[in-house]
Image (tube, helix red, strand yellow):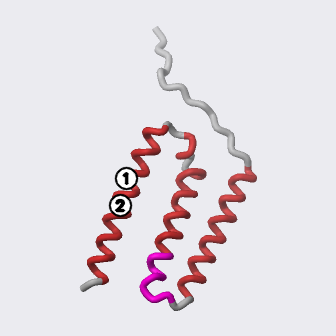
Amino acid sequence: MVHQNEHQHTQHIVGYGTYIMVWLALLMLTALTVTVAGMNFKNFAIVIAILIAGLKSILVMNYFMHLKFEPPIFRTMVYITVFTLAIIIGLTFTDISFR
């Protein structure tokens, strides 16, 4: 007896143009990070760099890891996990900066 797979996989075709646009956005965000690092923002430079890195990670997760095409519950769990990690890292930076 052959069992059919209950979870149907749908194929999502993303064009090369989308990948190129995301890659260009990642390059521009990297250049922005380097530019901000060269400016005198004092402690805000770290916060700005982390925010830019967070935006870059969202782009990578959604397009290159295809999280955009996953079921909503899976996406929600991944975003909760990343948000929790960001809070822990933020609290660690806060603790270190006020010592």
Residue at (47%, 72%) from the top-left corner?
Answer: 50
Residue in the foreground of this view, choosing between 55 and 2: 55
Q: Position of residue 42 (x, y in %)?
A: 45, 89
User: In which quadrant of the rendered view does residue 34 lie?
Assistant: bottom right
In the image, residue 44 lies in the stretch drawn in magenta: yes
Q: Is 47 rendered above or below residue 99?
A: above
Classify 88 as above or below 42: above
Residue at 61% across / 77% down in the picture?
32
Judge left or right: residue 97 versus residue 18: left
Q: Which residues make up the magenta segment?
A: 41-48
Asked if labels 2 and 1 touch by Cβ distance under 8 angstroms, the answer is yes
Q: Which mark is residue 85?
A: 2
Question: Residue 88 location in percent, x, y?
Answer: 31, 65
- Asked whether residue 16 is drawn in magenta, I would say no
Name the residue furthest right.
Answer: 17
Q: Which residue is mark 1?
A: 81
Q: CA distance from mark 1 to mark 2?
A: 6 Å
